[in-house]
């Protein structure tokens, strides 16, 4: 929602620019020159924000079809429950976002999920939405990558539906040398402890 005021301003500018001008409403030459300079600068900034750049290219490592090994830890310091699945990632919206569909089993239940990941140039952050069939929630992750951009670390607030406790989820995507990637998810407790 950070862009709503900007979109509203753009709509207001569009409405004002397309309104008819009568003789009594004509701006002075100074006002016309200042408005033209401002509009040209805004158009350049707007154009730059709409064009995918190098950070978007770094999302390519998750595009493709993947076999998954899913490991779920049901409590800290326990062995994981392991299952399998598939993922299919593809570019959408002019290679601005990667949409990944997941399918498999998690703890003997059918599992489906949809992730859309992109890079928001205005905030210089990677942004991901996550939805799955294990709940009715939408998680919105925000974060950055390390200096090599082989690892992206993102966090989201999450309301635990069982305890109604607000938790933080940390997701770490790491591109691997074999042209694959790993994704790890951690719950971050209010006291800052992390567990898978």
Image (cartoon, rainbow, N blue to C red):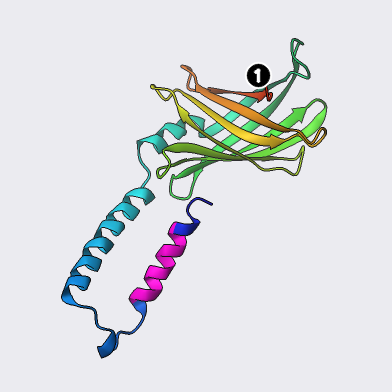
Q: Nearer the viewer, residue 75 or 157?
A: 157
Q: Residue at x 59, y 36 (%)?
A: 88
**Where does label 1 land, which residue?**
194
- Circle 1: element type: strand
Q: Is residue 7 magenta?
A: yes
Q: Nearer the viewer, residue 135 or 23?
A: 23
Q: Residue at x 64, y 35 (%)?
A: 157
- Point out the image quarter for the C terminus: top right
The correct choice, above or below, for 78 with respect to 163 in the image is: above
Q: Nearer the viewer, residue 74 or 189?
A: 189
Q: Residue at x 76, y 40 (%)?
A: 135
What x and y, as percent, mark residue 58?
42, 32
Tell whether 58 sits left or right of 111. Answer: left
Residue 53: image quadrant is top left
What x and y, as percent, mark residue 65?
57, 32
Residue 28: image quadrant is bottom left
What x and y, as percent, mark residue 13?
37, 69
The correct choice, above or below, for 174 with respect to 59 in the image is: above
Region in magenta: 6-17
Q: Is residue 128 magenta?
A: no
Tell whether 120 sits left or right of 78. Answer: left
């Amino acid at each position: 929602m950070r862009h709503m005021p900007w979109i509203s301003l753009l709509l207001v500018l569009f409405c004002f620019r397309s309104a008819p001008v009568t003789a009594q409403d004509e701006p002075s030459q100074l006002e016309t020159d200042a408005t033209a300079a401002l509009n040209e600068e805004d158009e350049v900034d707007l154009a730059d924000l709409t064009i995918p750049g190098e950070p978007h290219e770094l999302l390519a490592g998750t595009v493709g079809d993947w076999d998954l090994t899913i490991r779920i830890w049901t409590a800290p310091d326990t062995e994981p429950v392991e299952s399998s699945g598939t993922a299919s990632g593809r570019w959408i919206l002019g290679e601005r976002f990667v949409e990944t569909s997941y399918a498999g089993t998690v703890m003997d239940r059918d599992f489906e999920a949809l992730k859309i990941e992109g890079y928001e140039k205005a905030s210089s952050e990677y942004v991901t939405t996550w939805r799955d069939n294990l709940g009715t929630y939408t998680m919105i992750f925000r974060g950055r990558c390390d200096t090599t951009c082989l690892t992206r670390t993102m966090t989201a607030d999450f309301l635990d539906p069982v305890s109604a406790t607000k938790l933080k989820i940390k997701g770490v995507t790491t591109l691997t040398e074999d042209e694959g990637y790993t994704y790890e998810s951690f719950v971050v407790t209010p006291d800052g402890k992390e567990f898978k």
